[in-house]
Image (spheres, grey):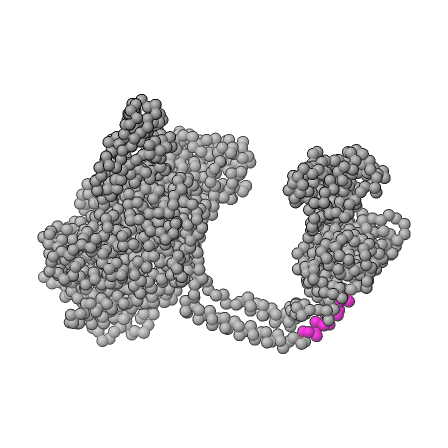
Amino acid sequence: MKHTIASTFAAIVAIGSTSFAADETVTVDFERDIRPILNSSCVKCHGAKKREGGLRLDARAFAMTGGDSGEVIRPGKGEESELLTRVTSDDPDVRMPPDGKRISARQIELLTRWIKTGAEWPDDSDRVAASQDHWSFEPVTRPDLPDRAERNPIDRFVRARLAAQGLDPNGPADRHTLLRRLSLDLIGLPPSPAEIDKFVNDDSAMAYEKLVDRLLESPHFGEKWSMQWVDLARYADSDGYEKDLPRPHAWRWRNWLIDAINRDLPFDQFTVQQLAGDMLPGATNQVKLATGFHRNTLTNREGGVDAEEFRVKAAVDRINTTMTVWMGLTAGCAQCHTHKYDPITQREFFSLYAFFNNTDEQDLAADLEPEQQAAYDQALAAHDKTLKDLQAQLKVEQPAINTRLNEWLAKQRRVLEEKWIPMEIVSRRQSGGPIGGGVLLGGRGQYEIVATTPLSRVTGIRLTVAPAADKKTDTGFTISHVSVTVKPAGKGEAGRLFLAQTRSSDPTSPNPSGILRTDAAGWSVKKQLVDPATLFIGTADKLGAAGLRGNELTTGSQDGETNLLNVFFNSPILGLGTVSKVRVFTMATAGASFGAYLLRRDGTSHRIVYRQDFTADGQAGEKEYPLKPVWEVQPGDVFAHSGNGGPTFGGGAGTKDVIHYPVSKLPAKGATVDFSKLPTIASRRYSMQVEFKPAPVDYEFVKPEWDDKGAQLTFQLMMSNDLADRLSFAVTNEAEPLVESISGIPADIARIVRTSDDERSQDQQKKLIDWFVSQDDMGQKLAKQIADHQKKIPKKPAALIHTVKVSGSRPTHVHIRGDFQKKGLEVQPGTPAFLPKLSPRGDRPDRLDLARWVIDPSNPLTARVAVNHIWAQLFGQGLVRTTEDFGTQGDTPTHPALLDWLASEFPRLNWSRKALIRSILLSDTYQQSSRNRTEVERKDPENRLLARQNRFRLEAELVRDQYLAASGLLVRQVGGRSFRPPLPDSVTRVQFVNKWTADSGDTLLRRGLYIHLQRNLILPMLMTFDRPEAILTCTRRDRSNTPLQALTLLNAPVFVESAQALAASIAANESLNDDSRIAQVFLRTVSRTPSSIEHGRVKQLLADLVDFYSENPEEAKKLIGSGHAKYWQATNLKPETAAVWVAITRTLLNLDEMITRE
Amino acid sequence: MNPAEHLLETRRQFLTTSASGIGGAALASMLAGEPAAAAESRTDPLAPREPHLTNAKAKACIFVYLAGAPSQFELFTPKPKLMELNGKKLPDSLTEGVRFAFINRNATCLASKRKFAQHGESRMWFSDALPHLATCADDICMIHTMHTKAFNHHPGQLVMCCGMQSFGRPSMGSWVTYGLGSESENLPGYVVLTAGGAARGGATLYSNGFLPSSFGGVQFRNQGEPVLNLDNPAGLTREVQRKSLDALADLNGERLRLQGDDEIRSRIDAYELAFRMQSAAPELIDTSGESRSTLDSYGEGDFAKNCLLARRMVERGVRFVNIFHGGWDAHGGLAGNITNNSKAVDQPLAALLKDLKARGMLDSTLVVWGTEFGRTPLAQGNDGRDHHPFAFSMWMAGGGSRAGYTHGRTDDVGWSIEENPVHANDFQATALRLFGLDDRKLTYRFKGLDQRLTGVGEDGKLVPELMA
């Protein structure tokens, strides 16, 4: 597209005071005035080639987007445009262009005016397209087939190219080779002798196609073809990093994969489910399991790591992996800086990253495997049966136990009652009167109850609140602020009993020891009181021990600590100390005055020693006010509180009556007032607390004792909530009053014991019996057996699937130079500009949109990359050799048209992997011999043109599979958990935390695909044969050829084992002679019969070995002895003969052909 | 010609023809900017190659890796100021915004209980924990200003061993072997020995990464079977092995004749090298031929044995030896940790340096004391130190490094670097240079980029002062 400058842009610029443009009608023309400046001074570094700082100034789309650190052109806002800042700066580190070149003043003027007037830049999207001219970014178009005779389209493409180079293709491979090739390529296992026999002798025209179809339907197809995807998914069975903990559930994703490939899940769905299966409508767990693809990232559980750092690392890996696996893009480079070669800016990278920045990990419960479930059910049933047997036995014993229980109960009650002396109520200050030896309480309020005691010393007091006989209460109650004074019957002054710790018999009480606390909780008994509730209070003889507890003014803090004291009427402070703050319920009226006062006894009157006024701020609720100065407090001091008499003080639980003055009537500081005449306003509820810090004094005092037995105890207490119940008191002089009188019995049981038989509830009865059974010899024995047995209930094995889920909306920022702590511009989820547009379902694109974009037919990369992966599996290398890189640094395709034909064919086949593979397998190109010819080697040493098939070494896992298959040892179970083969200590020692525990038994004979992948300890055999470390996505494996491989195949246990098993099955077969035995070994190992040359050479070895072992029978015994005896026990072979065959099979198992796909 | 004669003829042919198969092609692209290695008598990927620069002294490396981060304050850097500040906080300006693994920035300074003295003509500082090594002061090139960004072990170990925090990259040993091949025809080019517990990173620290697996570190054991699967099954004698491998070579040779695939030739070579290793490796670890005084000089224990084996490997042409010694991560019990670990490594390392020198091998053998980071001047608990990547100490000796030289200066408390910082990548670039390898040229094309040990960016500056 070409545009005319005149028609697209003409700006009339209003000129200010600039020097050159006196003419106000001068037009700044982008193409005439601006582009030349950019081209001459900027584009060299900020163009298609270099993209410094992610900025390009060669086309509008790029220029307006800006660089890695943001916009550079803000139309209309010259002063905010980085472009102008840079060209005008005096700082050589900032100024552009760098290195002393400067653009002229006139150019700066032009740029300035251009930006100020709106930075018009005509559409030049053709430049954008041209600048990204790279074959793989072009849309896939279905090419015409070359005009040739071959029937198969693939052959036409390949052969046309060969013809052009003057090369002939190889003829077809022989049938043995073809069968073995197909078997290895489709199921990764060699054909059996019977299969070889059948195929080689099947003359029908369809023999080959039938074979292809049979192998495509084999359950082992999914195993073989999952291997490549396992590499791509960097699947492993452990976390990686230092701790490298195992992931015992990871294999379920691999099961999904094998199954998905076996049922030929179309590649588009295969893709969407793995990238965003969790977001599909109505996704089942099986679909969510597909997202396990991205749960294979590493997890660092090393001590002291920053979890965010590694969350970010995993998210970065997820986008890198997605881009590499599906689109062949090395996006990862753009994490730290704009991609040097491919058109991905750093901001675009983080827009891609944003899709995964809001992805979290989630483990879902999975079904057990059928055999696991069956085993679990069986164990559970057995457990239940034993339990029932034990319970039946207990039932038989129960009557005898009950008898013992009743005897025991009677005895305990006697003990219990002797300890506590019920008190007789003398008087109470509240309406109503004593009833039935207790006090009927009359609703919330303050009580004063006087009772007499026959004891001369009290160590404990028991308060019992029983439900009223005549009504069931429906509210709970709280008793707090209990104080007790004792007045001897004869002469002497009343003294205070200092109350110490408390304990409630009611385990359900929210605050069973809270009676002495000054907050609202107190001793709270919940609603629906049915049984009597009891509170025990000990008395203290030392404040040091009890702190300041024991007084209604205090909280339960220790001596010297700051206490919050509730201040209320007639409550003098006990000790020396300071008060630094008061806390009051403020009035809601802003500006209202009130104050706090400290009064001190002064003879018979009180003197006001401190006074401080406050002003309410209008906010209702509890407020704290610091005191200036801090108030020094002495024992006996009283606090007072003043207000303007307003009625709007906060009320409710916890408010107290305080000495209260209207502000206007309060005497001045220093004045002396008559305490008894101080006004108290009991009708209103005010609250004041003070923060009291006791002085470090020893508060030891003597616990009151009295001679006579008629002393009066006066109880003062507060009750809140409207519960009217009978309250009774008892006292004791036992040394440890809080220890329930029945020693060794828990409080709740003791409480039940105290309850009479007919008052006991069913629950209580059951509890009592259960407890007693646990104490009874016989009962205990059975109960213990039952309890122990119940502990042994079979544990359901954990079964999880690892999935991902959408999580919130973390904002995403560019990480400056890839550092997750240095946040740059905020970016939104999005895809790179050079690729087709994303079509999100909603406002904010999400991961499901990304997944659908990846697989959209307009995406030029996905299908090309996918068919290339498949091609690489069947030819040993891709049409694009760099399977991981389709960008500008990757290899170009050897057959671009063929690649595009396949890429268009794949969606046309409904993305059926099997169908695509099938069409490749039916080509002559695939079926041709792999023999190298001098002519081909000379012209095309790397066989890029496919004048022959490729010969290549099998993958590590398949190498192992070949040995087990040839020897007949292979266990062909498809899917399932991973297994750990045994390893020497010297190898496992490298593990830091997580020790390698080898499995045993038949599971070790499963296919190599199922070997446990411990990231820091990949099985040496696998590593030796180039298995990747499962840390990063891997699109193609190395195929090295090393002496360690030779040593592994010659001597590693599983390979020696294979030689033994194969030797035993051949040598012991009496229907064979040595010649046919040699032929059999060839058939079992390399799927063909030996040539006469080969046969002759093996016969020669056989003769040499026969000589050796007949002369060295003790060596023969060693070779077939110890660990290998099991293969030989059933045979009658002489050790010398057996040993010869072990050496023969071991040799032939080491043929290069054995581990090679020909 | 009977079959056997025919095979013999074939074998003669392919053993005298040089290979240029996939292995050869891969090698040709390895040394960017260099002409493909001339056909050598050896065709395997480990055949020796010339470095980029001539006159390089180092031919082999013994990289001793002390995993867990030994405390520089207990070993190499006396800091009298820490005595004064013992129990006090550092100024906020130093610790502002700093990430720690376990402690917080209010932690207080911890003075070393070790005694320090200067040694040799170079007056190099060592603590009394390393009395033997101190006698080698004049051969050592000490660096006090190492730094890195990683502050957790495994990432830090990856940086020091493989150049970057990310996984899947080749270790330095792999790069050197890739660049220079190996002088040994009977042993792997890159060998790994471990002692004193594991390096936490495990095999990722000596992996070949994206390089061909021939360049991966091969773990040797210092007793019993030195290489995994080296020993034939019982009853399969060396004679039977020879007969078997002869037959195998003939049969593979026949396949080579038919298929014309050079990989088969490499396979035959690999089996032959394996056979040679079967005798060379046991001979290597059998130290009974060493003199009493040599054995005594190295002392007892796994680490000592590994140091001696490393010398024997280098003598036999092994290019790169990694010795890992773990267990230095003293978040608590620092005093005991230093005493015990130092005791295990001090004498053997000193013996190694002296032994190499006495045999005239020190000039061509680079010995490195490496680790992932240092430890804080701040206390963790009352006897521990946390991770400190901002300034720490390493040293090297021999191989053309500058003997008796101390590089770089940290501040009074060893918190930060005051002059001459050396990033892990700088160190690596310099170490490669001692081998005549230019880290910018020693590249391998992977994921569309010419990858190198020191990363793909601008990091990795040569530190000429470290070179003699």
Hey, which quadrant is residue A1111 in on the image?
bottom left
Q: Residue furthest bottom?
A: A396
**Which residue is at the front of the view, A325 or B186?**
A325
Task: Tell me which residue sits at (35%, 51%) in the image.
Answer: A840
Task: Tell me which residue sits at (38%, 45%) in the image.
Answer: A828
**Which residue is at the front of the view, A298 or A342?**
A342
Hey, which quadrant is residue B178 in on the image?
top left
Q: Residue furthest top?
A: A19
Hey, which quadrant is residue B445 in on the image?
top left
**Image side of residue A258 versus residue A417, left or right:** left
Whether residue A1013 is visible here, answered yes or no, is no
Classify A1039 as above or below B87: below
**Which residue is at the front of the view, A495 or A346?**
A346
Give yes or no for residue B94 being in the magenta stretch: no
What span is in magenta? Answer: A401-416
Percent across and percent down for residue A367 are 43, 65
**Image side of residue B121 versus residue A1127, left or right:** right
Looking at the image, how many numbered discs can be counted on the residues? 0
Task: Tell me which residue sits at (78%, 34%) in the image.
Answer: A668
Give yes or no for residue A407 being in the magenta stretch: yes
Quadrant that contains the C terminus of chain A? bottom left
